[in-house]
Amino acid sequence: MGITVDGRAVVGREPERRALQAMVDGARAGRSSVLVLRGEAGVGKSVLLDHVAEQATGFEVLRVAGVQSEVEMAFGGLHQLCASMLGRLDELPPPQADALRTAFGLQAGRPPDRFLVGLAVLNLVAAAAAHTPVLCCVDDAQWLDRVSAQTMAFVARRLHAERVAVAFAVRESPDDDPFTALPHLIVRPLRDHEAATLLDASIRVRIDPDVRERILAEARGNPLALLELPRHDLSSGGYGPSTTAPIALRMERNFSTRTQALPRDTQLLLLTAAADPLGDVALLGRAVEHLGIPEDAARSAEETDLLALGHRVQFRHPLVRSAIYSTASSTDRRRAHAALAAVTDPVSDPDRRAWHRAQATVGPDEDVASDLEHSADRARARGGTAAAAAFLRRATELTADTEQRGPRALAAGQAMLDAGDPEAATAVLAAVEPGDLTELDRARKLRLNAQITFARRRGSDAAPLLLAAAEQLLPLSPVEARDCTLEALGAVVFAGRLDRGFEVLAAARDAAAAAQPPSPKDLLLVGLAVRVTEGMGDAAPSLRAALAAFREDSGDDPEVNRWLWLACRVAADLFEYDTWATLAHRAVRLARTDGALSVLPIAASYLAGVHMHAGEYDAAAMLMEESSAITAATDAAPLIATLPMLAAYRGSEADALAQVESIRTNAADRGQDTALSMIDCAHAVLLNALGRYDDAFASASRACDHDDVSLFAISLVEMVEAAVRSHHPEAAAAALERLTERMRASGTDWALGLEARSRALVADDDAAAPLYEEAVARLTAAGLAPHRARAQLLHGEWLRRTNQRTRAREQLRAAHETFVTLGAAAFADRARRELLATGEAVRQQGVAPTESLTAQEARIAKLARDGLTNPEIGSRLFLSPHTVEWHLRKVYAKLGVTSRRHLRDALS
């Protein structure tokens, strides 16, 4: 049984047609669906897309086609998708609308975060679907430009309850195919009887049975081959040479043979059309006129059935375009590109004009290279870093002047790194001849190679490389040297292990200290350099000065904001809770305002830490869930350290242990000592809460092997408790000595309260009482409920063991109530057991979640409870407002409420 689409036969394909029809039906009913059709060239994917478009009556159909020569043009595919919807931009939140306008070159602005662009496209499609169901058909998706492909895959993953169906057609996937995680259907060759039916339907004359069988055998069920092979075989009387070449290659050869038999002018017209990805008929007409091709060549081209000149230039099949272009001579290709460059408006489309000029150029040409460099600047301003890299790479190839070639190659490498392609960046840098670089450029190349190393692994091996680059930069460009040194220190803070390079640290520190006036990042560099080389005691004053500068900063300088994450780590290292909270809140606010989704997960994780140490576990969990949602949506590396610590404080043994074990191997492979230390510290917290002190001692010992810039001293606190309770007095004393140095350098109530609590554990009975009282008083003043409650728990345990049961009950009761209120189940149970030992009956309590809600529903319900609107919740969780409303309706039904104003009581 078959159908026709635009006069083309569709034989068989019942499973594919059913799947596509189900997509359309689901979208009509308000259920979004996505399907990726995969298969070899010519197998019928494009025909199936045409078929589903014909079935989608009443839909707004959005058509996109990837073009091989358009791969380097940033946002080209995305612009095709959104072109008809741009009138709805004002319906989006302003940051999203501005991001999309900037990406499409409709307005000037800072480079938009590409995932804010993705969120804008998601909401734009959802807004269109609120009026009319939407079908998106994306053909030849393997040839979309990289940012468009990633954005479309991002949008497809986030569609849920919109009236939207998305169908992609893509060939066999490369390693970096962004569509691999989406539902897919393999479009296989036709079965034998279906192939025979299609062949017979396409041939209007009788043919020899042997020729028929040969065509069927060579086509191997490929529909395009079944339609095209007879043209060749019948023209050769059925006695053309047999071949075992792949079908796609065979089809390209056939199309090429047909093209080469045409008149010369017609060939050149077809080639010019193939070289222009826009399919603009008027542009092609101007290029043809520029080439001096007569008008009848266009009629001749259409008569070949290889292309049609309607509203757009459309080839019979993508293989026709690639066959014409790839088999043309280089001279003819350059002629076609030169003609297209000559007739492309340099004002409205300067980048495509520059690209055509570059393709038309053989040898070095500074004028063209300069045009490409300007195009790279424009692409970068739109957030098209991959396009900027392509422009700069070609500009480098066309540059003869060695003084310009080296810097352009470095700029290309930097753009490739910024585009997330460190391998390509390495290849570009490897091709740079030493003679093309000045001494300063050689130092910059060293720095870029070090940045590439850090981008690949996020491990400890990058820090010494960055310091070596800083050493070379120092006499040549002190400002760049200071930035590079701060990058090295950032790598140390992220991964740990700095064991050399102290001389350049000292030199950079002195240079930063001499800067007048010193910026917040100069002060941060000074403090961190002292912290790494001389220890916390000497560094504390400088670090406090840096933190004060960050707190006083207006937040308008991107170079200062870039290092907010590191300032947060320093604030935590100094136990400066209020400063940590202030900077983390600012970092999250700036990231959300700017739509900087590459920064937001880091900022959210630090703010989660602020809430976690205050005992605000729900707030911390929601921030970590937001961070995880972003990293999952953007395919970024997950931020891991806060998750097991939060599970540990909550006392969820299964969650904490599962996270610890899944994370440890990855962090060890990358040399991330800081992450390993925090993981072991989280494990020690959990085991101390459970009273398994021998195991806690082992975990805390590993955590204390590495000192880093963060809350490392928490590991020492856990070590003291575990060592005392597992009878390792020497280890407890050694950890306390290290802890005392750190905490007294800090001097905050939080730090000194934890030190007093730890000192009380190792003190004799006469000295312990005032130390416990000091610990409770200081941690109460610090306002950090879980740390105060742990001090009360330890104090109560000591009082019970010294037979002061009445006073013990007071401390244990207060600790137990706090732990229950916070939801710290393991510590609450430990306090309950101690209360039972004093003779007080206590009912076992815990904090149970609203079990009927899914994790996604719980996140949405809590955000709605806190007053966020549906669009605001959607922006946090990468959902459209309509999907948020759909989830909320299910939440109301499960909780037995009718509106969001009842959620506070229902969730509490």
Image (cartoon, helix red, strand yellow):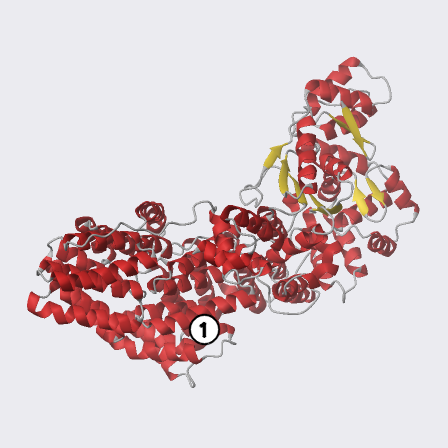
Q: Can the viewer see residue 159 in this picture?
A: yes
Give the left or right position of residue 698, taking residue 354 as reference. left
- Give the residue drawn at x 45%, y 73%: 480
User: Which residue is at a point 62% across and 41% down the rendered structure image?
Assistant: 34
Q: In what quadrant of the picture does the N terminus appear?
A: top right
Q: How many marks?
A: 1
Could you say which is closer to the camera, residue 814 or residue 339? 814
Q: Position of residue 116 (x, y in %)?
A: 58, 59
Q: Within the image, what quadrant is residue 74 found in?
A: bottom right
Residue 506 at x, y percent in the picture: 31, 75
Instruction: Name which quarter of the figure residue 255 lies in.
Output: top right
Residue at image x 70%, y 41%? 28
Q: Tell which of 168 and 846 is nearer to you.
A: 846
| Residue marked by disc 1 | 480
Hey, what amino acid is under mark 1?
Glu
Left or right position of 98 against 655: right
Q: Is residue 423 above or below residue 52?
A: below
Q: Is residue 390 visible?
A: no
Tell me if 125 is positioned left or right of 847 in this view: right
Q: Horizontally, is 660 left or right of 76 in the view?
A: left
Quadrant housing residue 415: bottom right
Image spot of residue 549 (x, y percent): 41, 80
- Mark 1 residue crowding within 10 angstroms, few (<14) / some (14–19) / many (20+): some
* Secondary element at tag 1: helix
